[in-house]
């Protein structure tokens, strides 16, 4: 049973204090690791992606946040948003579906996919909901971004209190404008959304831009926003419990929107875009900030992987074995090896150039997620990316998936042996593999890696820049992904652990491992790093009590539960509004 069964187990998450169990904690490492996850009690069928939002925070400085001497604080909290509070009060009216958790209130905003730091602030995201802000210290809910009336919501589905908003799990923070860019899609139409940190959002419709499936990522350069159609396919019949009949689209439109065009016109004004086509399908992509020589983007392709299809009880896996019921809800892993490509787009000529393609089928299968140096300096001169691969995992590929992808996947070419998970460093220039570490236990399932730069070191009062006296180990290295460490959480039935690698040579293995006895952590998603965390400040944030004008559509008891949630939130965070 190589895939860990604990990954979807209904484990009650708990605060822990992690200790060094192997190696030595690197000198100069610091800051806070933030991880998003679906809450363990709501994992499983029909899809593990739709569990209520959960946040974990690991402090890389010992003896902080109550951790005893020599240990590191692992803290967790349920995101107590209006969605989650209502589901907790009235669980009997909430139903999990392949499109999320539905209720008479509307669609739950799970906010469980990716953390997004913005200076001292912290936002949690999901593809079918507005970004949610939480306090970086307490991890409690502060407010949704933008009033529901400022977004285009799916009004043909009931949502008197919890609107269905299709956005993206990966907004970006603009270094120059100090704003958040994201999207709002509706029945294929694309709009760009700007949020300046307080008050209302602004939206611009994009002319002639059509999203056939979904948007999971938006990326940016200094002058351009880049939006591509992503491989999360929902056929109409699936909305009503039907079966998938078609694979995810093999090609995707890519749209480039000039930021200056958005700046030049009022919100609501249609803005043009540059349109391209790209294959194979993808979910994540990352643009280089500097764009004087064109818009350079790295695409992580998800060819013949289907995260919109999930394992069910009674499924048969790729090797003809009945799937363990404990894996019900797990998304579909890749049926073919991983590809990563780099392209340069010339907005003036409309030409796309393929600069590099990474395809090593014997080594890399089922890429999970990647780590970058997300700092401004790192994106000015990116050097490397660090990617986690889960390997070929027949248990996470069921025969229903293979039937849907029959025209693309030759079952006879599927590997006859499982592949161990791995962590690899690839160069930004040419996507060459620099270094690789293979996890020795086939049951190890590493998750989202995090890059931690060396230019911060712990002090008694927080963190200081290396220019203030902290020692930098790789003196002289350029920023961009090699001057630092790669932190990798690892899920396993033998216990959860956190491994720390020297970013310049992950192939040497972890320099340090943190763990706690009998510590199990289930399925987790994206992660991020913050140099420090401080309590949130009073700002103009949305109150849930401002969005209760639709209560007339609910029964009296359901409406009163919504009012109770509004009162609770108003009393807990009186500085909001």
Image (cartoon, rainbow, N blue to C red):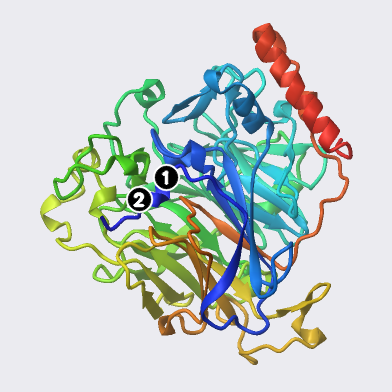
Q: Is residue 150 above or below residue 282?
A: above
* Residue 164 position within the rendered picture, expressed as x and y whole percent measured from the top left: 58, 28
Q: Secondary structure at mark 2?
A: helix
Quarter of the image for the C terminus: give it: top right
Marks 2 and 1: in contact by CB < 8 Å? Answer: yes
Residue 5 image label: 2
- What crowding class fits label 2: few (fewer than 14 Cα within 10 Å), some (14-19), or many (20 or more)? some
* Residue 228 position within the rendered picture, expressed as x and y whole percent measured from the top left: 49, 48
Q: In this rendering, would 350 be left or right of 436?
A: right
**Farthest-out residue, bottom:** 476
Say whether residue 59 is visible. Answer: no
Quadrant in which residue 248 is drawn: top left
Of 413 and 49, the residue lying toward us: 49
Q: In this rendering, would 238 be left or right of 510?
A: left
Q: Marks 1/2: CA distance?
A: 7 Å
Residue at which label 1 appears: 9
| Residue ID at (67%, 10%) | 557
Query: Number of labelled discs?
Result: 2
Quarter of the image for the N terminus: give it: bottom left
* Residue 215 position within the rendered picture, expressed as x and y whole percent measured from the top left: 51, 43
Of 391 and 385, the residue lying toward us: 391
């Amino acid at each position: 049973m190589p895939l860990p069964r604990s990954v979807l187990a209904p484990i009650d998450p708990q605060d822990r204090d992690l200790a060094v169990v192997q190696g030595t904690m690197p000198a100069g490492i610091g800051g806070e690791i933030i991880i998003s996850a679906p809450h363990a009690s709501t994992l499983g069928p029909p899809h593990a992606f739709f569990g209520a939002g959960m946040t974990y925070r690991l402090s890389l400085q010992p003896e902080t946040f109550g951790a005893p001497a020599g240990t590191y604080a692992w803290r967790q909290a349920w995101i107590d948003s209006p969605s989650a509070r209502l589901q907790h009060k009235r669980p009997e009216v909430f139903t999990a579906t392949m499109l999320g958790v539905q209720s008479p209130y509307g669609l739950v905003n799970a906010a469980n996919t990716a953390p997004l730091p913005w200076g001292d602030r912290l936002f949690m995201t999901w593809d079918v909901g507005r970004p949610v802000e939480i306090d970086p210290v307490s991890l409690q809910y502060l407010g949704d971004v933008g009033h529901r009336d400022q977004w285009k919501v799916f009004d043909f589905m009931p949502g008197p209190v919890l609107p269905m908003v299709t956005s993206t799990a990966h907004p970006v923070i603009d270094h120059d404008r100090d704003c958040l860019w994201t999207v709002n899609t509706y029945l294929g139409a694309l709009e760009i959304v700007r949020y300046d940190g307080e008050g209302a959002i602004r939206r611009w419709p994009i002319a002639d831009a059509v999203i056939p499936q979904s948007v999971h990522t938006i990326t940016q350069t200094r002058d351009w926003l880049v939006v591509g159609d992503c491989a999360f396919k929902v056929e109409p019949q699936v909305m009503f419990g039907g079966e998938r009949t078609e694979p995810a689209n093999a090609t995707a439109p890519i749209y480039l929107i000039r930021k200056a065009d958005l700046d030049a016109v009022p919100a609501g004004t249609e803005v043009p875009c540059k349109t391209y086509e790209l294959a194979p399908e993808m979910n994540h992509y990352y643009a280089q900030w500097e764009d004087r020589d064109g818009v350079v983007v790295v695409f992580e392709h998800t060819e013949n992987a289907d995260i919109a299809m999930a394992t069910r009880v009674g499924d048969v896996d790729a090797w003809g074995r009945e799937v363990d019921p404990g894996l019900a809800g797990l998304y579909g892993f890749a049926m073919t090896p991983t590809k990563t490509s780099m392209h340069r787009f010339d907005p003036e000529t409309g030409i796309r150039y393929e600069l590099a393609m990474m395809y090593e089928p014997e080594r890399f299968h089922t890429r999970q997620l990647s780590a970058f140096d997300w700092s401004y300096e790192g994106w000015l001169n990116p050097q490397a990316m660090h990617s986690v691969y889960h390997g070929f995992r027949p248990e996470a590929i069921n025969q229903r998936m293979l039937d849907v992808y029959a025209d693309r996947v030759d079952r006879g070419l599927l590997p006859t042996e499982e592949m161990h998970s791995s962590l690899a460093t690839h160069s930004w220039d040419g996507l060459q593999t620099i270094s690789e570490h293979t996890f020795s236990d086939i049951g190890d399932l590493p998750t989202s890696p995090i890059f931690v730069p060396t230019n911060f070191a712990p002090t008694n009062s927080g963190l200081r820049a290396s220019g203030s006296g902290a020692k930098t180990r790789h003196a002289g290295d350029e920023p961009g992904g090699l001057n630092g460490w790669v932190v990798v959480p690892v899920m396993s039935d033998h216990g959860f652990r956190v491994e720390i690698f020297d970013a310049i040579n992950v192939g040497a293995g972890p320099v340090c491992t943190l763990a706690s006895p009998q510590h199990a952590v289930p399925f987790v998603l994206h992660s991020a790093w913050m140099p420090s965390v401080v309590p949130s400040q009073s700002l103009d944030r949305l109150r849930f009590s401002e969005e209760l004008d639709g209560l007339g559509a609910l029964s009296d008891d359901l409406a009163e539960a919504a009012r109770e949630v509004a009162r609770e939130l108003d009393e807990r965070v009186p500085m909001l509004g």
